[in-house]
Image: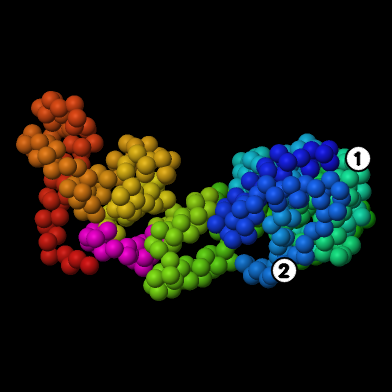
């Protein structure tokens, strides 16, 4: 097993995993410049067991809680990935299905899906009372006992050299307890450590409806008394076997209809809401983006990317009106740097009000931005993983709402040729296509010209409308 960890192929794979979303960082570029040399040196150190991890860089992060994050040197991260490449598949086989942290195909949204399924089963489609033990482990990462963790690991890993490497990584913070937040190995070992709790809850307590995400877990049941008993048994197990304990004020048995705070959402039977603290955090971030945009420090597209992630997250709760409100504010405060991008701000905002739910992800605005920057229609489709017909649909809508001119999309000869065969703006595209008798002209081309005609008719009445 240790030979597999130290192999050049595994270290190269580890390097490629460690550099994901960090390729522009200077330390990644430095490592990549002499990649073969660095990997060979690392391999030699591991084989000779002379490898020594670098000191951790520590900083404080306040979002929303105050957390102490420890960052490993890049070469150490490569070693972490190399180790996890080999040992993760061995341990994951023993994890329960409803352990949702730090695993491929799992995550917070998957955990919420399971919660929705369990609450319907236990409450029999909301026809009887349902209770939830919402529990949180106190100071989990600070209290993990290294000796207990190593005893758990040794049940599966018999190779002494692998054990030596794991101990090297764990002892980097010079403590017999705690794991540094921010390391890949810490996330994995956190799952290994609490897998003991998972097995206890599922096999000893026989709790059917149990979900855990790192140090946060819920058990759903129709009996409050049963949940109170389980809470005591779980706390005793944690103290005796793992030397950790439940948080005294954050671990409670609650009624489902009063709302359960779980993984950033407040979950009720029929709906989900975003937690107020998360909404307030985003409000601060949004105002910060406004300041940066007004000072010209970030582009509109960068601001859009930040907002898009939040909208995607919000879409998993009942937040339709809130998302509409955010879109209106975004279009109000983040106008395009190039004034030619939006000919009439009021018309553009009206257009954004009319678009369907799919446009909440700003795909139309992205198409406009890319097209104005000279990106071709096929390349826009590839970039955003959508069909070319969808891009054409965006352009047709943008022309109709006067955000784009048909003369910017089609050549003059083609436009004049189509115009000569259009007798009414109410005509069907099929009839115009038959009259044209030209295979080089597509239905999308005709639709663009028709949209231009419709836009002139639509906005004739609004000539007095002030433009910005």
Name the secondary structure under disc 1. Answer: loop
Q: Give the range drawn in magenta.
A: 326-347
Sort mark 1 into few (<14), some (14-19) or many (20+) by Cα contacts within 10 Å.
few
Residue 14, x across and y down, in percent: 69, 45
Quadrant location, the C terminus: bottom left
The residue located at (77%, 62%) in the rendering is 54
Q: Relative to residue 103, is residue 175 depicted above or below? A: below
Q: Name the N-terminal-most of marks 1 and 2.
A: 2
Disc 1 and disc 2 in contact, CB within 8 angstroms: no
Residue 254, x across and y down, in percent: 71, 57
Q: Can residue 430 be seen in this view?
A: no
Q: Relative to residue 328, is residue 453 depicted above or below? A: above
Judging by the rendered image, the residue that carries numbered circle 2 is 58
Give the side of residue 112 with respect to residue 209, left or right. Answer: left
The residue located at (54%, 68%) in the rendering is 280
In 3D space, how far apart are the residues under numbered discs 1 and 2 (Cα atoms)? 33 Å
Q: State yes or no: residue 338 in magenta.
A: yes
Q: State yes or no: residue 331 in magenta.
A: yes
Q: Relative to residue 120, is residue 278 depicted above or below? A: below
The residue located at (89%, 62%) in the rendering is 176
> Quadrant of residue 98 in the image?
top right
Judging by the rendered image, the residue that carries numbered circle 1 is 158
Closest to the observer, 225 or 191: 191
The residue located at (75%, 65%) in the rendering is 56
Q: Can residue 406 be seen in this view?
A: yes
Quadrant location, the N terminus: top right
Name the secondary structure under disc 2. Answer: strand
Sort mark 2 into few (<14), some (14-19) or many (20+) by Cα contacts within 10 Å.
some
């Amino acid at each position: 097993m240790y030979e597999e960890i130290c192999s050049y192929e595994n270290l190269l794979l580890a390097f490629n995993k460690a550099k994901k979303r960090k390729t522009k960082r200077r330390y990644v570029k430095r490592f990549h410049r002499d990649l073969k040399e660095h990997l060979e040196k690392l391999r030699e150190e591991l084989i000779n067991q002379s490898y020594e991890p670098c000191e951790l860089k520590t900083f404080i992060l306040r979002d929303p809680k105050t957390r102490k994050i420890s960052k490993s040197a890049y070469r150490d991260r490569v070693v972490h990935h190399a180790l996890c490449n080999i040992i993760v598949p061995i341990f994951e086989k023993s994890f329960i299905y409803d352990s949702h942290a730090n695993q491929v195909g799992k995550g917070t949204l998957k955990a919420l899906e399971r919660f929705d399924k369990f609450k319907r089963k236990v409450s029999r489609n909301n026809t009887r009372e349902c209770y939830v033990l919402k529990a949180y482990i106190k100071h989990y990462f600070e209290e993990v006992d290294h000796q207990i963790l190593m005893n758990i690991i040794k049940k599966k890993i018999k190779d002494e050299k692998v054990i030596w490497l794991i101990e090297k990584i764990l002892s980097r913070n010079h403590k017999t307890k705690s794991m540094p937040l921010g390391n890949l190995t810490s996330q994995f070992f956190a799952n290994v450590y609490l897998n003991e709790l998972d097995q206890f809850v599922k096999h000893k307590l026989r709790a059917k409806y149990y979900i855990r995400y790192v140090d946060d877990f819920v058990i759903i049941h129709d009996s409050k008394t049963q949940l109170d008993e389980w809470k005591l048994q779980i706390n005793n197990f944690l103290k005796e076997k793992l030397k950790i304990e439940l948080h005294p004020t954050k671990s409670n048995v609650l009624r489902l209809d009063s709302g359960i705070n779980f993984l950033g959402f407040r979950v009720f039977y029929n709906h989900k809401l975003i937690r107020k603290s998360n909404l307030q955090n985003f409000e601060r971030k949004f105002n910060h983006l406004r300041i940066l945009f007004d000072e010209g420090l970030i582009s509109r597209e960068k601001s859009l990317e930040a907002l898009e992630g939040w909208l995607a997250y919000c879409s998993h709760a009942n937040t339709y009106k809130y998302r509409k409100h955010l879109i209106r504010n975004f279009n109000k405060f983040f106008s395009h740097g190039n004034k030619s991008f939006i000919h009439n701000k009021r018309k553009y905002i009206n257009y954004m009000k009319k678009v369907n739910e799919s446009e909440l992800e700003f795909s139309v605005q992205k198409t406009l931005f890319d097209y104005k920057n000279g990106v071709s229609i096929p390349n826009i489709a590839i970039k955003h993983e959508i069909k070319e017909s969808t891009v054409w649909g965006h352009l047709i809508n943008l022309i109709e709402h006067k955000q784009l001119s048909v003369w910017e999309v089609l050549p003059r000869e083609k436009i004049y040729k189509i115009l000569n065969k259009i007798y009414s703006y109410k005509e069907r595209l099929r009839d115009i296509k038959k009259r044209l008798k030209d295979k080089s002209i597509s239905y999308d081309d005709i639709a663009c010209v028709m949209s231009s005609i419709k836009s002139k008719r639509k906005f004739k009445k609004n000539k007095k409308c002030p433009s910005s």
